[in-house]
């Protein structure tokens, strides 16, 4: 047995410990996006439309009329805070 095959048979590769996200105590991938609390998520109009089961056009009409869930612009893009959408939804149930 040569030097190379002896090194392989001894298990030359060691597993490195995975990094852990301290807030959630779960292993994280180095390529994964950082975890964000649900209430801090920024949603697109398309995502809000799916959540509310309405058409995107209706969201834009609500925005123009000052109705619907609160929204704001990030650059030229309209965004909704998930917490604001959920709060608005709860207020509509009453």
Image: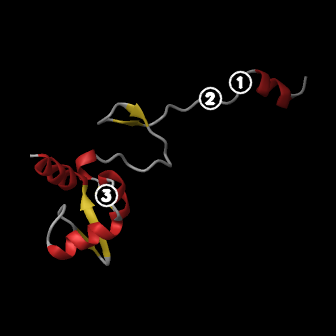
Q: Is residue 27 left or right of residue 62?
A: right
Q: Which residue is mark 3?
A: 48
The quarter holding residue 37 reads top left
Q: Nearer the viewer, residue 7 or 22?
A: 22
Q: CA distance from mark 2 to mark 3?
A: 45 Å
Q: Which residue is mark 2?
A: 14
The dot on residue 68 is none
Q: Nearer the viewer, residue 46 or 31?
A: 46
Residue 67 vs 14, above or below: the answer is below
Mark earlier in primary sequence (2, 3): 2
User: Residue at 83% across / 31% down in the picture?
Assistant: 4
Q: Which residue is mark 1?
A: 11
Q: CA distance from mark 1 to mark 3?
A: 51 Å
Residue 14 vs 69, above or below: the answer is above
Q: Label 2 crowding class (10 Å Cα cut-off): few <14, some 14-19, many 20+?
A: few
* Contact? badges 1 and 2 (CB < 8 Å): yes
Outermost residue, right direction?
A: 1
User: Residue at 16% across / 74% down in the picture?
Assistant: 65
User: Residue at 35% across / 63% down in the picture?
Assistant: 55
**Does dot 3 land on a helix, a strand or a loop?**
helix
Q: Nearer the viewer, residue 66 or 9?
A: 66
């Amino acid at each position: 047995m040569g030097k190379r095959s002896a090194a392989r048979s001894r298990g030359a590769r060691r597993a490195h410990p995975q990094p852990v996200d301290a807030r959630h105590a779960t292993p994280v991938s180095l390529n994964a996006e950082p975890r964000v609390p649900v209430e801090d998520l920024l949603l697109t109009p398309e995502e809000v439309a799916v959540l509310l089961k309405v058409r995107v056009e209706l969201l834009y009409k609500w925005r123009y009329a000052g109705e619907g869930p609160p929204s704001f612009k990030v650059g030229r893009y309209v965004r909704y805070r998930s917490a604001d959408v959920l709060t608005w939804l709860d207020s509509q149930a009453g």
